[in-house]
Image (cartoon, grey):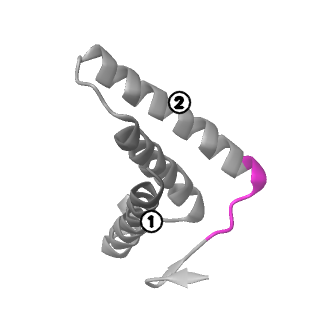
Amino acid sequence: MKILGIQLNKPTFNELTASAVMAAGLWLACVALFKVSEQPIDRIDAGAALLMIFWGCIGVRMGIRFDRGLRHVAANVLGGAAILVIYHFAVTLFV
């Protein structure tokens, strides 16, 4: 499958699992950093941060990398924006 001319890879189950574990660890570090710096982060922002970190980890496994040019950067930004729009729409509906 191609998006913006980028050939996407289909990640294996082990790659998805490794990405999920990495995203969870990075998210915990991010939340801990906010707590130590005494700047509170509410749960909606924490959820958005988790989704963006997870997208970054999965995107690399799919073949979307920042170091490969402007198309990859655009695909990453568009994917992240789409995820955030869906997330904020769901938060608006259910919270």
Q: Position of residue 7 (x, y in %)?
A: 56, 78
What residue is disc 2 on?
Answer: 25
Image check: 14 left or right of 24? right
| Residue depicted at 36% across the width and 65% down the height | 81
Given residues 20 and 93, the one toward you in this image is: 93
Quadrant for residue 36, please give it: top left
Task: Give the answer, above or below, for where 94 lies relative to 69.
Answer: above
Disc 2 secondary structure class: helix
Q: Position of residue 50 (x, y in %)?
A: 46, 43
Q: Position of residue 48 (x, y in %)?
A: 40, 48
**What amino acid does circle 1 point to?**
Ile
- Neighbours of disc 1 within 10 Å: few (<14), some (14-19), many (20+): few
Disc 1 secondary structure class: helix
CA gap, disc 2 and disc 1: 24 Å
Image check: 41 left or right of 83? left
What residue is disc 1 on?
Answer: 86
Q: How many marks?
A: 2
Q: Earlier in the sequence, mark 2 or mark 1?
A: 2
Given residues 42 and 1, the one toward you in this image is: 42
Q: Which residues are magenta?
A: 9-14
**Most common secondary structure along the magenta stretch:** loop
Given residues 70 and 94, the one toward you in this image is: 94
Given residues 10 and 20, the one toward you in this image is: 20
| Residue depicted at 38% across the width and 43% down the height | 44
Question: Which quadrant of the rendered structure holds the N terminus?
Answer: bottom right
Image check: 89 left or right of 10? left
Q: Is residue 4 rendered magenta in the image?
A: no
Image check: 49 left or right of 9? left
**What amino acid does circle 2 point to?**
Gly
| Residue depicted at 48% across the width and 65% down the height | 64
Q: Position of residue 76 (x, y in %)?
A: 40, 65
